[in-house]
Amino acid sequence: MTANTGKPARAIPGQPDMWVLVLFEALVFTAYFAVYLFHRSAHSELFLRSQARLDPRFGTLNTLLMLTSSLFMLRCVQASRAGAIRAAMTSALITGLLGTAFGVSKITEWIRLVHGGSGFTSNEFFEYYFFLTGIHFLHLLIGFVAIGVIACQLRRRERRSQEVVETCATYWHTVDLLWVLIFSLLTW
Amino acid sequence: MAGARADGELILFWTLPVLAAIWVSAFFLFPGFAHPMSPALTAAQVAGFYRDPAHLSLIRSSMILFNWFGVGLVPLLTLLVLQVKRMAHRTPILSYCLLGCAAGGPAVFLVADIFWLLAAFQPGRDPQLTLMFNDLAWMTFTTAVPFLIGQSLIIALAIYLDHPGRPVFRRWVAHFNLVIAAALVPAAFTGLALSGPMAWDGLLPFWLKNTAIAAWIAVMSVVLGRNIYRQRAA
Amino acid sequence: MRSIAWHWRNNPKRELWLAWYATVVFYNIFFIVFFPVTHAQPPPHPGWSDAQVAYWFARSHGGLLAGFAIMFAIAGLTAPQNALIAYSMRRMSVSRAFAYSYLVMYSLSALPGMLLLCVVLSVGALRPGRDPAQLHWLYDFGFLSFTGTMGIFLIGSLVWMLAILLDKNRVMPKWFGYLNLCNALTEVVVAPAWIFRTGVLTWNGLISWWINIAVFGIYTGAFIMQLRNLILREDFGDGPLPSLAEATR
């Protein structure tokens, strides 16, 4: 899709193609959630017992970090649209830092769980826990690549593509959305 | 002397007869080929084959030779890819197909080689295990035809689609490749028979297949060599 | 018939079409052999006992041997598919390194990714009297090698994705580039098959097989259609490809 610079604001932010990815991933994750919920209802006592071993402070912190990072991503896009490139770069950087903090927090939580005796293969709940948070973490890493692409776009003087910036922002918001869903599923 | 390019192409080409000599020696060195082992042998007989001190060093040395030189055919295949690139096609896609087949063939052969070496590594083990390794080796070796069939069909196709007035290879080479491809097909079905002409020591999967491969290497080397010398002289 | 003969002689895209039809034929045969003939897919359970595995081999005996024999004969059809995809990258504005990397990786992929399973399960079916513990070893070897050789398809999909996203010649739509990312992720999702013998993350599990195969099926269908569009639009030039509407006018 080629962006025509003389065009007025598009109906869909970023490349429409990115929304195909977003919807597709949403479908796949919905399938994962359905499988999880089905097995949870079959073994609710085991799941509830195992959930109690999760530290709620980590979950809360991680959710706050993710939501705040999305806020800064939004500010980055708005600044970029208005042409305030330095402000946009700063917002992008903060997004990245918050994402990194989320990553560190997640890894810390995993290490604590494993040392506490709850690993990937410990029981059915933790199988789902590590799988879902693991696959989310992978999406987060891809999100860092997206931020990198935004930074590259912002650095350019000519041929900077607002469409690409918005496309990457869409992806980051998806990572945030997936986290909120996973967090809700795993801790309720 | 005129137009002699020091690009190593001729060196690559002349590795072929050396390679052929090594392969043929290794082939007859391996006691399992010189008199092909039947799939109908019992575990005790197969274990006996590997435990026989007269056989053991021959098995290991021939298989190690094959292990070293198994991929030696890749330069020939790559030189053929370069010939296909010279043909009058609109796209390079046929040379890509050929290159893809070139990777697959030697890799599958190496796996068979590993299984034979494994079988010979600890001949004192449970005969059932030795039988299994022997089965894996023979099955892998005999059924390792898909990429050979593929490359013959692709070469034939490339020649048929080439410019009819100035072909890189003459049409009989294409017909020859079709015949070879057909000759290799029965070996794929060897799993269906433990004795008779379709067993892995039988007429079609062993004698016809290996003769076809040898014939293909010989004929393609000759036409390739003629092409290379003719193209370098021009 | 006469139309086919005319195309064989005159269509400048004939080699591309031959590669495309080879791809379609391959997937059809692959599906028929792996699903109804050999019953190797959907995969049987990794948690079975030796006796259950031995029973599975005995029951599928004829289908396994005949079906995989067909694969040994026709697996060369994977070469035109890889060549066509590599060609799609060569048509793009990106470096040829993308096309060649993909070609090398996928050319080798058929060995651990398919042929090993065919050989190993054939050997398992070859002798009905084999010790069940050995059959179990062959069973694990076959299915794990098939399911668990993920690196090639993971990296290969990422290579194609990167080429598509960077391409300025509009060879493939960007959404298909992103779909490559989804396909690459299925290779990560399947990795726990090496760890679990029960549950949803096994080689036949709800997540690692069923949901994964749905994604893979959609991806395969998508790329077959995209390759067809590529051939229809191909103008043998160097620049951006015309759209499908323009090319088929």
Image: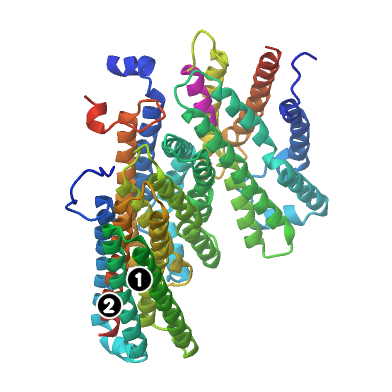
Q: In this orientation, which residue lies closer to the viewer: B64 or C15?
A: C15
> Which residues make up the magenta segment?
B151-161
Query: Which element carries disc 2, helix, strand or loop?
Result: helix
The CA distance from mark 1 to mark 2 is: 10 Å
Badge 2 amino acid = His
Q: Quadrant of the C terminus of chain B?
A: top right
Q: Are marks 1 and 2 in contact (CB under 8 Å)?
A: yes
Query: Which element carries disc 1, helix, strand or loop?
Result: loop
What residue is shown at x 46% (from left), y 47% (from top)? Answer: C65
Badge 1 amino acid = Val
Please tell me in which quadrant of the rendered image residue A182 appears.
bottom left
Residue where numbered disc 2 is placed: A39
What residue is shown at x 35% (from left), y 33% (from top)? Answer: C240
Q: Is residue B182 visible?
A: no
Please tell me in which quadrant of the rendered image residue B200 appears.
top right
Q: From the viewer's perspective, is B34 left or right of A119?
A: right
Q: In this orientation, which residue lies closer to the viewer: C153 or C87?
A: C87
Up-down relation of residue A129 to residue C105 (above or below): below
Q: How is the image coloured?
A: rainbow
The subunit carrying tag 2 is A
Up-down relation of residue A47 to residue A26 (above or below): below
The image shows residue C56 at horizontal and vertical percentages of 41, 61
Q: Is residue A94 visible?
A: yes
Q: Quadrant of the N terminus of chain B?
A: top right
The image shows residue B157 at horizontal and vertical percentages of 48, 23
Residue where numbered disc 1 is placed: C200
Up-down relation of residue B71 to residue A23 (above or below): above
Q: In this orientation, which residue lies closer to the viewer: A24 or B28?
A: A24
